[in-house]
Amino acid sequence: MAEALLALSGVHTHIAQYHILQGVDLEVPSGGMTALLGRNGAGKTTTLRTVMGLLKASRGALRFEGRDIAALATPEIARAGIAYVPESMAVFSDLTVRENLVLGARQAKLDPQRMEWILAFLPALKKFWNYRAGDLSGGQKQMVAIARAIVEPRRLLLVDEPTKGLAPAIVQGLVAAFRELKATGTTILLVEQNVTFVRSLADSVAVMDDGHIVHAGPMREFAADHALQERLLGLAMGAPA
Amino acid sequence: MSVPMIRLLLSDDLPRSRILAVLLVAIVVGLGVAPFVTSGPRALNAAATICVFIVLVASYDLLLGYTGIVSFAHTMFYGIGAYGVGIALANMGPTWWAVFSGLATALLVTLVLALAIGLVSLRVRALFFAMITLAVASAFGVLASQLSDFTGGEDGRTFTVPEALRPGYRLVESAFLGRDIDGRLVTYYIVYSCSIALFLLLLRVVNSHFGRVLLAIRENDFRAESLGYRTVVYRTLANCIAALVATLAGALMALWLRYVGPKTMLSFEVMTDILLIVVIGGMGRMYGAAIGTTLFILAQNYLQSGMARASEALAAVPLLAKALHPDRWMLWMGILFIACVYYFPSGIVGRLRGAGK
Amino acid sequence: MSDAIVPAASVELPGKAPDYAPLLLVPAVAIAMIPLVGSFPAWVTLTVAGLAMGMMIFIMASGLTLVFGLMDVLNFGHGAFVSVGAYAATLALLPLAGWASADSIVTNLAAVAFAIVVAMAATGLVGWVFERLLVRAVYGQHLRQILITMGGAIVTEQLLSVIWGPDPIPLPLPETLRGAFVMGDVAIEKYRLLAVAVGLAVFAAMFLVLNRTRIGLLIRAGVENGPMVEALGYRIRRLFVGVFVAGSALAGLGGVLWGLYREMLTPAMGGEIVVMVFIVIIIGGLGSVGGCFIGALLTALAANYAGFLAPKLALASNILVMVAVLLWRPAGLYAVARR
């Protein structure tokens, strides 16, 4: 079995005096999408932020491609090939869409071919190219944030609730985007509450509760086990699309 | 004095360190007998300044060390107290009535200003608040210089004090241990006893429930807010108490100097001195104010002659000689200050208490 | 950075209108004062004086506001950089006394330019030491920042006294920069024009750097959301040092201009002006260079007009302008930093 791209073992994270992550063991296999599900407050966002180095783990090991990243600073973790799309305040409001995307390209130039590919499944970006990102709607901002994260090829994409508050039409666009990304070999770790969204996209699933992982396995099995879904998430995913 | 009485007096905030306790007793006793173990006006002036500044610095520590607020308006309140009494005595004649009405007016003005600053500015971040207090204090200083008819402008005003406080007054005809029991002595002991009283009052404040809430707010104001304490109210109250005590200190100083002036009472130099002492003595430790002030003022008065001698001795190395010149006293204080902020956040007293356990 | 990637914008969507109101403040106030001042020549003198002073304050304050916006650090010792710049200028101007007293404007300007370069280099170095030694240790701790930077300012000022002595030092203006252009009744001082020109140049340069270069892009993004910029792989800590040094150098430039304006240097001169600098950056909005520009001009003009119309009010005019602006926009003219 191939070694996991990202592996957390026994990770604890504190925020002030609150013990948020209480021993997280998570393995994200290379290629495909892993969905991280769980109730509000379970610690999903904190997990992503800890991986990204925005929060320091108080205990435990984090390995990416076999490398220990727990002690690295956020810029180094990003340079190792991990991109992060946070739930809110992802885009820079005072900058235009173009400037936001340019920041995603550490080579300082946008690769025309890559941009063409991105614009194919996120066409709305064309319209807002020179607009101030802060003037866009929530869904449009989300698209900018995702586009910026993939302007250059990444090994791992951490995405936090991309569909939150978005209209179904926009969500469709995101589905297309993620399918494209998977096809190019990018591994995605996706935090979501919208379980329908992930059911068709994700290959594996991990469920968090109270700061640790309570279930991990292939999505197919999880999607078929309604009783398990009810128990862990308090709801079932519904019939397959 | 029995131990329970001492505990009551000190609001249960015992020195908890032999060295500290010895130093504090030495300070209290030393200041108490200063008029009789020294001669000449200079030493007595230093002693009186120490008394007043201990109160002034302790009141600032209430803000900085206990509540975690940096305010540059503290000298303003000190000046208000001084000018209140001074202007009243100058305009209303040298009576006790003038002293108290001047003081009352000053306290009122302070209260209004402290409330205004507190309620308006304490909702903003610490940096913002610090800048705003700096601007307000600076404007006030300018105002005091401008309204020269009232305040005596840049040069300040001298005034006559009530009869009992004047140098010519004699409480007792004969001298005692080399000092005339004159008005200056009376003034000195008024300053001394009021300073002790105010210091003990501040001790009571910081060791009360109120004081503990302030510390909690300083540590983590979100938490305190979530526990139900309206942080704005507490901070404003702390601001007001500190300001009022500073005003009283100013009044005492005015009575002692028989003079008020912007340089002595409103200048940024005074503010820097207070900051230096608070940090070096120990933030969040009332006794730090006492020890720090004593050391600072003694050094300021007596160390500088040592510096002068060293400077002359090093005349061969011009740069070093200039650096040790007594006027450059602030240079070394500044370095000590930085070192304390860096390494000793709890100052001298913190070290002593840590060592004395 | 190619716009060729994307076809020319097709659909025009209504974006939010740019925020023009603050831009009108300075012209509005200036024009409103014409009837109040009465005499046109007097108005011109006051306005030019205000603009010149405003430019100098802007130059001094611009670095401070950017450092705050980007690094969340407020350097209470910023005034020390102003003093250092002015004193460093003497290092250049005194040896070049020949150039300074020559009768050719080119030589004079060359002397001033050289003094500026020396001053900015010296102040930049002091700024680097400041950041390395003092500021770096207290990132994120505002209380200690205030204290330690104040301590740094005290030590710096005292060192200036040690090296140059505590007494005021004269810094005479070069010959051709003295005096005024006279056109009929109106007199405009030459040096003030120079100050305005330098101020505009600095503003233009900052504008270009912030809006047209990659570093500027990083700074603007970093001011808004530093951790996100790091999450994109940029080591903005390194940028911090650069911005801090640049900010100090700018303060040094302001110090040179101001020192020449007063023709007199004292170690505490930076401390005297620092309150006004703080007021200006509060008015402008912490983190906004444009707001700082407008705020500086506004405050200086107000001080000059008040000095003419209501002298007792003049020294409090700064505070009054600050209160007025904050009542209109509590976060300053252009609130930038999302803090």
Image (cartoon, rainbow, N blue to C red):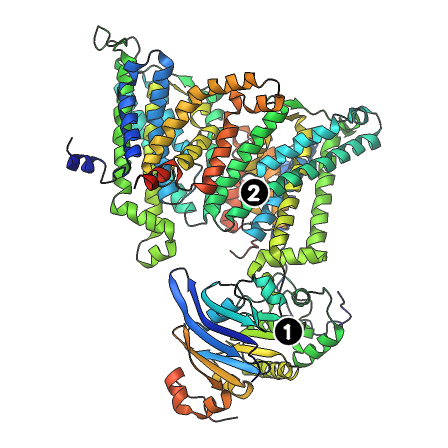
Above/below status of A37 relative to B133: below
Q: Where is residue A135 in the image (x, y as percent from the top left)?
A: 60, 66
Residue A179 occupies quadrant:
bottom right
User: Which quadrant holds residue C64?
Assistant: top right
Label 1 secondary element: loop
Which chain is disc 2 placed on?
Answer: C
Q: Mark 2 points at which residue?
A: C133
Can you tell which mark lies on residue A154? 1
Pick the residue in front: C153 or B227.
C153
Quadrant including the N terminus of chain B: top left
Q: In the depicted view, which residue is nearer to us: B277 or B1?
A: B1
Res B121 visible: yes
Residue A93 in sight from this viewpoint? no
**Number of numbered labels in the structure image:** 2
In the rendered structure, find residue C291 and report the number of the disc placed on it.
none
Residue A9 position within the rendered picture, expressed as x and y whole percent measured from the top left:
47, 73
Marks 2 and 1 belong to one chain = no
Query: The disc numbered 1 marks a residue on which chain?
Result: A
Which residue occupies 74% across, 40% down?
C197
Left or right for B6, reference B85: left
Q: In the depicted view, which residue is nearer to us: C336 or B188?
A: B188
In the image, residue B69 above or below residue B56 = below
Mark 2 belongs to which amino acid?
Leu
* Amino acid at the residue labelled 1: Arg
Secondary element under disc 2, as helix, strand or loop, is helix
Q: Is residue A183 above or below residue B215?
A: below
Question: Residue B303 at what x, y percent from top left?
Answer: 45, 21
Give coordinates of residue C106: x percent, y percent.
84, 33
Res. C161 image quadrant: top right
Classify 10 Å Cα crowding around label 2: few (below 14), some (14-19), many (20 and above): few
Contact (CB < 8 A) between labels 2 and 1? no
